[in-house]
Image: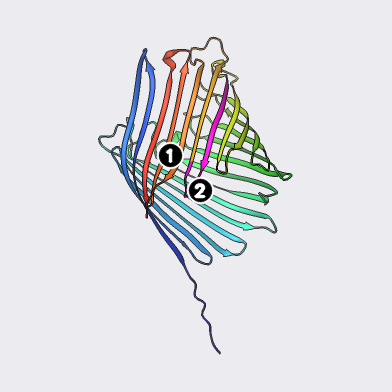
Amino acid sequence: MSIIACPITTRGEVKNRLTFGFDSFIDRFTILDVDTAESVQEYYAGLGNDLFFKRKRVSGGLRNFFRVGTQTIDEHIDGELSLLPLPSTRIDFRSFFHYKHFQESSDYTFGNDYIQSNTLLKIRRKLGEGSKLTLRSRFEGVDYERQNEFDYNYYYYDGGLEFETGSLLRRMIRVGGFVGHRAAPDTTEMNYERTAGEIEAQFMLGDNGLFHIYSMCDHRDYRGTVRSSYWLVLSQAELMITSLSGRSLSVKFESEYTAYDDPTLIFFDNHFIRGGTGVKIPLRERLSITAEPRIARMFCRDYAEERYLEYTVILGIELFGRNDFWLIASYEPGYRDYISETNDIYSDFYLNRLSLMGSIPLRMGFYVNIFAIHDPEHHMRREDDFSVTLFTLGLTKRF
């Protein structure tokens, strides 16, 4: 009798990257008719290492990115592991660790060193054809070097179940719910119990139509009197129709409703809704333009000063090339009109939001990555003018 041994092979891959970059944050506002600007500029260098492996029923990876800058020092570690103990059962485990240190010469006014960790566990089991049940659990913890009114240590954990049936290519329905608890040992007023449920559905309408809807209800019950317990209901819906030429038309709606058990001047009931109609037109194989007019409304039962109407239109361009080249840019002009005629808190303003992000490959494994946001507000009262500008530019070498 002979025994034939079948070796179990393990495939692994190691990737590395070296990055040099520049970050800029500029906050402009007006105090007593004097234009003021607060800015933080940082030059940095970072080294990233990624390890991936895969066996017959096991796969995973470990990634880290260490960055030293003129303002901060960061360390990111991210690990994941997937197991298939049975053909119908999958276990996914992921953990994330982040350490941030502010240099002594840092320009950050409220810099405070901290350690943050997040862990996620999912156990998914198939239930017949097209259905699956998922048990999920999450843990998050934050530890600050110095305790103050805004930065306090806490840990949070939750657990729950999800049931999903159907297919994304035809019809899918997902229902889930979970309960959670947050504890802040040194600030017990911020402890809360959390209960949340969500439902998501997606339906294909013929050969070129898609309807997607999502809603979540979240209740946070605070144990202290500093924050009021509240309900938060988020809802989104989108109908998209795509033609054979690649053109698409979409109708979107979103809603965010917040209701407090004990409203205050800071935390009060409000309801934000927004709707829009977008179109995407391909000009070439990898080039397309987009346009989406939107209208939004803020409702507030108790404070007329908070109510407004906002009209905007998002104009965008998307370009995807070969060798990982991509570029996405958008411009969103608009106007926010506060409904109250006598408003001592807010004033109407014009907005002109600009955003740009992309990756440009160079020779010898080098990449240029860019990310920029400019969000100015030009108010009817000059002293209310405000703008935020973010800019990140990095040169990365992969090896």
Of the numbered discs in the image, which one, if any, rests on residue 138?
2
The residue depicted at 57 percent of the width and 26 percent of the height is: 313
The residue furthest front is 284
Tag 2, which secondary structure? strand
Q: In terms of depth relative to the viewer, which is nearer, 279 or 385? A: 279
The residue depicted at 60 percent of the width and 34 percent of the height is: 234
The quarter in which the N terminus is drawn is: bottom right
The residue furthest left is 105
Image height check: is 337 above or below 325? above
Residues marked 2 and 1 touching at CB (< 8 Å):
no
Q: State left or right for residue 166 relative to residue 37.
A: right
Of the numbered discs in the image, which one, if any, rests on residue 184?
1
The residue depicted at 52 percent of the width and 53 percent of the height is: 121
Q: In terms of depth relative to the viewer, which is nearer, 147 or 225? A: 147
Q: Residues within 10 Å of mark 1 (few under 14, many from 20)?
A: some
Q: Which comes before the other along the chain, label 2 or label 1?
A: 2
**Residue 97 coordinates in the image, percent (x, y):** 40, 48
Q: State left or right for residue 374 relative to residue 304.
A: left
Q: Is residue 325 magenta?
A: yes
**Residue 92 coordinates in the image, percent (x, y):** 53, 56
Amino acid of disc 1: Ala
Image height check: is 87 above or below 140? below
- Find the magenta span and give its range: 309-326
Amino acid of disc 2: Arg
**Residue 394 coordinates in the image, percent (x, y):** 37, 42
Q: Residues within 10 Å of mark 2 (few under 14, many from 20)?
A: some
The residue depicted at 51 percent of the width and 40 percent of the height is: 319
Disc 2 from disc 1: Cα separation: 17 Å
Q: State left or right for residue 224 relative to residue 364.
A: right
The quarter in which the C terminus is drawn is: bottom left
